[in-house]
């Protein structure tokens, strides 16, 4: 299911289609003249006249003798400069919004990782113009280098575009039913099985928390369950928070607090994004994706502060705040996931504002109960420029979730360590999974970056894909 006005295969093309592509040359601050010594004197003079000095993201278009575009030069900075932590390949994502339509190719594939270069270009080329009358435009296309892993690159780019599309859609066009349709479309593409429990059937099937959160909305809540792969392969289960809009419930948010709440299904988008990557790459895993989808609305049947609700796991939960609904729907989904004892269980959720206060919008905190897996996740995020940072799951804060009338409260007392307390809450519903990792993502890019424009972002999906690739390979 792609919603954008363009497809990834329109901005990334096969090597055989790239005859005559305009070359892109990369040059650093310390040696740009040496790196570009092969260019004609007139073009070197043009670079100097335009003030090119190799600074990262500085782009100059080179004219040919006829005046037509003959090349592109992109600055990659200095090894010890302000962009020292940014890979050279990643910087290629800055080019698509700046370049005129046409076909381009990397002039020197030894200057960067060709696969990451292709991914960066594809992510940087994304645009969401569905609701603009004159939104569609012809885009520049990059010829995939022969050395690039085209299958892996396209899986990553298509997955992220899907996740961005889902998050960017406004809630009037992306409710629980539409999220189900997206999952079904993805399942049909990859021959995966999709089962859905809807509305009051959630009570009959023992998903009381999902039902409670979504019952006040005119759009019924549901649990989406996608499975793919051979049954006896390593079991990878993804759980994504699918709150399609969050008013806060009876503990209502402020007007400004609701402005971005269409992205509160960003965890579901990240899970579907990752699922597409896994299935497109044909990894030998048994994949399961669980998405509790609901709208946290206000109405006569809305759940209330101080209500006590029994979860699927049998634990009772006192509602300390109806705006902490994400962890409630995840609890039922996690309990279901845990029943079959998966090898690796990952959750993705736009869960707490505390995570943003701690690490900002571009660095996703994660919580993991396995030291080896945690190390691999951190390394993978750094490798593919999908940054994550581990926060503690074992803490002295267990008692903060105590309730006088139930097994636990859904929020902690006071305002401290909100992201940690939420992760502790989720972990109580995971007993049999061999490893567990939870990602408290933002799901949004507040300003343009090298790897994409302002808007929805399925954070951590690419990082976890690299981890699952290793797991499947082993």
Image (spheres, grey):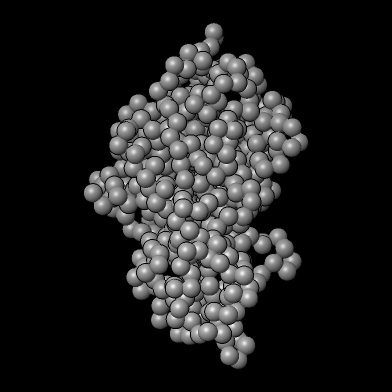
Q: Is residue 466 above or below residue 49?
A: above
- The quarter of the picture where residue 195 lies is top left
Q: Tell me what residue is drawn at x 35 percent, y 26 percent.
A: 431
Q: Tell me what residue is drawn at x 64 percent, y 51 percent.
A: 447
Q: Nearer the viewer, residue 147 or 217?
A: 147
Q: Tell me what residue is drawn at x 54 percent, y 79 percent.
A: 44
Q: Is residue 285 above or below residue 314?
A: below
Left or right position of 297 against 1: right
Residue 257 in sight from this viewpoint: yes
Q: Is residue 309 above or below residue 171?
A: above
Q: Nearer the viewer, residue 17 or 242?
A: 17
Q: Nearer the viewer, residue 126 or 356?
A: 356
- The quarter of the picture where residue 137 lies is bottom right
Please state the total of marks drawn on the protein image.
0
Left or right position of 392 against 2: left
Where residue 3 sits: x, y (%)?
59, 60
Where residue 194 sits: x, y (%)?
44, 48
Where residue 462 sits: x, y (%)?
44, 51
Residue 334 in sight from this viewpoint: no
């Amino acid at each position: 299911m792609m919603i954008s006005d363009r497809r990834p295969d329109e901005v990334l093309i096969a090597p055989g289609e790239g005859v005559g592509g305009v070359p892109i040359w990369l040059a650093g601050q310390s040696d740009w003249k040496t790196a570009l010594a092969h260019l004609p004197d007139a073009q070197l003079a043009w670079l100097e006249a335009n003030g090119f000095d190799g600074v990262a993201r500085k782009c100059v278009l080179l004219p040919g003798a006829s005046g037509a575009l003959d090349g592109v030069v992109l600055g990659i900075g200095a090894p010890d400069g302000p962009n020292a932590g940014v890979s050279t390949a990643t910087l290629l994502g800055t080019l698509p919004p700046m370049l005129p339509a046409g076909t381009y190719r990397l002039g020197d594939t030894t200057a960067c990782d060709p696969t990451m270069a292709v991914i960066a270009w594809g992510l940087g080329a994304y645009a969401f113009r569905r609701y603009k009358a004159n939104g569609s435009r012809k885009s520049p296309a990059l010829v995939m280098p022969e050395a690039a892993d085209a299958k892996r690159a396209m899986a990553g780019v298509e997955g992220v575009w899907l996740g961005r599309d889902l998050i960017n859609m406004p809630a009037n066009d992306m409710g629980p039913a539409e999220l189900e349709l997206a999952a079904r479309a993805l399942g049909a593409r990859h021959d995966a099985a999709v089962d859905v429990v809807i509305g009051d059937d959630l009570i009959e099937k023992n998903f009381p928390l999902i039902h409670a959160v979504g019952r006040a909305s005119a759009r019924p809540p549901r649990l989406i369950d996608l499975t793919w792969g051979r049954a006896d392969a390593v079991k990878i289960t993804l759980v994504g928070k699918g709150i399609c809009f969050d008013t806060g419930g009876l503990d209502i948010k402020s007007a400004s607090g609701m402005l971005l709440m269409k992205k509160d299904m960003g965890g579901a988008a990240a899970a579907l994004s990752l699922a597409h990557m896994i299935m497109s790459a044909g990894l030998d895993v048994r994949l399961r994706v669980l998405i509790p989808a609901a709208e946290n609305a206000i109405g006569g049947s809305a759940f209330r502060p101080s209500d006590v609700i029994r979860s699927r796991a049998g634990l009772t939960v006192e509602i300390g705040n109806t705006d902490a609904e994400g962890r409630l729907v995840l609890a039922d989904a996690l309990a279901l996931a845990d029943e079959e004892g998966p090898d690796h269980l990952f959750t993705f959720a736009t869960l707490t504002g505390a995570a943003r206060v701690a690490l900002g919008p571009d660095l996703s905190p994660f919580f993991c109960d396995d030291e080896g897996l945690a190390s691999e996740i951190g390394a993978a995020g750094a490798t593919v420029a999908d940054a994550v940072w581990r926060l503690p799951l074992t803490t002295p804060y267990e008692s903060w979730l105590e309730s006088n009338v139930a097994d636990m409260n859904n929020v902690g007392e006071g305002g401290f360590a909100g992201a940690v307390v939420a992760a502790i809450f989720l972990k109580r519903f995971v007993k049999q999974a061999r490893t567990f990792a939870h990602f408290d993502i933002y799901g949004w890019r507040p300003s343009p970056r090298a790897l994409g424009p302002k808007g929805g972002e399925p954070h951590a999906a690419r990082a976890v894909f690299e981890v699952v690739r290793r797991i499947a390979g082993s």
